[in-house]
Image (tube, rainbow, N blue to C red):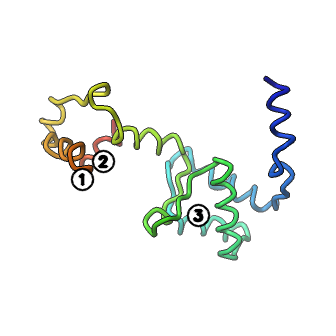
Amino acid sequence: LRKCIEGVVREDESVLQEVPIKWLVFLDEILNRRKTESYLTLRAVKQLAADIGITSAAEQEKALQMFHEKGMLIHLTSTAALNDIVTIKPQWLIDNISNVIRDDSIHMFDITELKKMELLEEVETMFSRAVASRDVLECLERR
């Protein structure tokens, strides 16, 4: 297995890519926030970059793109709403998506709890019409 991994790494040209030290400091600053946050706003991330001397918006975006491509964080840019969020705990995002995109015959909700919270109808709407209310999503995130 070790030899196989070494072979793949040697063939990956991105391993040879030079990265400015300030980008590594930038990444460390972002990832240090994992202790207390699952995601940051783009504005907060750009402020972290500026605080360590990465003031160019183009360089900030390039660094974020590289961190995203390497799987260190998730920064989706296809819409303004997605672009505004930088997920610094990718597993947090996966866990929360799996609360919504799931096979409800295998992974069932506690119906009693949903009734008590007056969310049963909204959960049914989520599965039948693919529309989830903020209340449902916040409830699922707390689970």
- Give the mark nearer the N terminus: 1 vs 3: 3
Occupied quadrant, residue 89: top right
- Residue drawn at x 69%, y 75% is 55
Give the amino acid type for the residue marked by disc 1 in the picture: Ser
Residue 54 vs residue 12, the one in the foreground: 12
Crowd tier of the residue under label 2, counting other residues whose Cα lies within 10 Å: few below 14, some 14–19, many 20 or above: some
Give the residue pinned by disc 2: 137
Give the amino acid type for the residue marked by disc 2 in the picture: Leu
Q: Position of residue 93 (x, y in %)?
A: 47, 45
- Residue drawn at x 54%, y 65% is 44
Q: Is residue 35 toward the left or the right of residue 15 in the image?
A: left
Query: SS for tag 1?
Result: loop
| Placement of the N terminus among the 4 image quadrants | top right
Q: Compared to 24, does 125 lie above or below? A: above
Residue 17 vs residue 38, the one in the foreground: 17
- Give the mark nearer the N terminus: 2 vs 3: 3
Q: Are marks 2 and 1 in contact (CB under 8 Å)?
A: yes
Give the amino acid type for the residue marked by disc 3 in the picture: Val
Occupied quadrant, residue 5: top right
Task: State the CA–CA distance, disc 2 to disc 1.
Answer: 6 Å
Crowd tier of the residue under label 1, counting other residues whose Cα lies within 10 Å: few below 14, some 14–19, many 20 or above: few
Residue 23 vs residue 29, the one in the foreground: 23
Q: Are marks 1 and 3 in contact (CB under 8 Å)?
A: no
Crowd tier of the residue under label 3, counting other residues whose Cα lies within 10 Å: few below 14, some 14–19, many 20 or above: many
Q: Which mark is residue 133?
A: 1
Give the residue pinned by disc 3: 45
Q: Compared to 6, does 56 lie above or below? A: below
- Total tally of numbered discs in the picture: 3
